[in-house]
Amino acid sequence: QVQLVESGGGLVQAGGSLRLSCAASGRTFNDSPMGWFRQAPGKERQFVATINWNGGRTDYADSVKGRFTISRDNAKNTVYLQMNSLRPEDTAVYYCAATTRISGLTFVNVYEYDYWGQGTQVTVSS
């Protein structure tokens, strides 16, 4: 059974930092892109960041460029999201996503992913 388990969320003041982790089990995703998405109350799930299979390519939503960094450790089957200079508008549930498609590209759309974690809450106070 494939599972993606996120951790590292919490409450932080504006300007602070958090590091999210997503550990995959049940199969490896070393040949595939992985991503982070977020969903605020009453809003659709939106793309945050994605990384290709070997970490050689990353893409970010404009709203997080320069503040967030996605990385992965294939030996640990884990993807990370370092979030700096957090803002109240970053408040959301953050989801890790993985796909079974073998590709050297990055995927920015919800429909391109097959597996999702349960989400971790990030709350940024002003």
Image: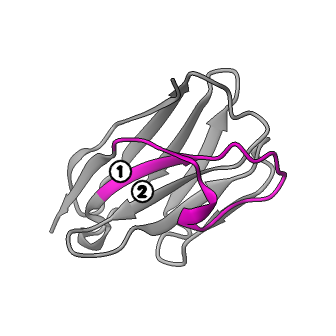
**Is 30 situated above or below 87?**
above
Is residue 42 shown to the viewer in this render?
A: yes
**Is 10 situated above or below 89?**
above
Q: Is residue 114 magenta?
A: yes
Q: Residue at x 75, y 50 (%)?
A: 52
Relative depth, front residue between 102 and 64? 102
Q: Find numbered disc 2 in the image and state the secondary structure of the residue it sits on.
A: loop
Q: Residue at x 50, y 64 (%)?
A: 48
| Amino acid of disc 2 | Asn
Location of mark 1 (residue): 17
| Amino acid of disc 1 | Ser
Residue extent of the magenta highlight: 93-118
Location of mark 2 (residue): 84
In the shown orientation, is residue 56 left or right of residue 88?
right
**Picture quarter containing residue 20?**
top left
Residue 6: percent from the left, percent from the top? 39, 37
Q: Quadrant of the C terminus?
A: bottom left
